[in-house]
Amino acid sequence: AVTRTFSIIKPDATRRNLTGAVIKMLEEAGLRVVASKRIHMSREQAEGFYAVHKERPFFGELVDFMMSEPVVVQVLEGEDAVKRNRDIMGATNPAEAEPGTIRKEHALSIGENTVHGSDSEENAKIEIDFFFNEDEIVG
Ligand code: CMP
């Protein structure tokens, strides 16, 4: 089925002018960008978005990183979009990512790993709603 997922192009990528390179890989993987905005996350947004990780030792570092430079938040649409996006992103740790994936090609480290993508359909809906109103999504 055609479904939606949520994506963030992270600060390490916007800083290195890789926004277009990342979107090209998403599009070539069969995903369509149906909503997109470049934002500089506030602390409230970064902490709220990653609230599920707030007990993790890297939470502070993660929040600081996500606020360090602009990001591009996007809604992606396609056949089985959550899985398709996770496949093209590659493993969280770029050292473990398959060749040809976004993180293998572009990520710097497990923290500076170029992209975020929802891990389930349920979280995709929550994450899309965190950043977008329905009228901002144009399929
Ligand atoms: P993301 O998919 O955005 O969701 C949580 C993020 O935490 C994850 O990608 C990683 O970038 C980050 N993360 C996971 N493990 C670590 C770690 N050990 N140190 C720093 N950041 C991490």
Image (tube, grey):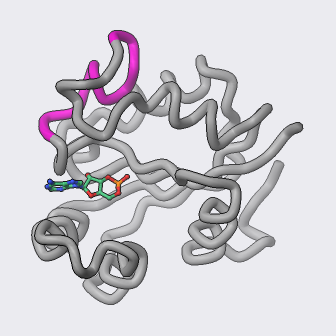
Q: Nearer the viewer, residue 74 or 51?
A: 51
Q: Residue furthest top?
A: 99
Quarter of the view holding residue 89: top left
Quarter of the view holding residue 41: bottom left
Write the residue at 41% across / 50% down: 116
Residue 82 in percent (x, y) is at: 64, 43
Going by the image, does 13 lie left or right of 8?
A: left
Write the residue at 27% across / 21% down: 104
102 within the magenta span? yes
Q: Residue furthest right?
A: 1
Q: Magenta region: which residues?
A: 99-109
Residue 89 against residue 8 in the figure, above or below: above
Q: Quadrant of ligand 1?
A: bottom left
Going by the image, does 90 lie left or right of 18?
A: right
Write the residue at 23% across / 80% down: 55
125 within the magenta span? no
Q: Nearer the viewer, residue 35 or 99?
A: 99
Write the residue at 13% across / 76% down: 60
- Image quadrant in which the N terminus is located: top right
Going by the image, does 75 lie left or right of 105?
A: right
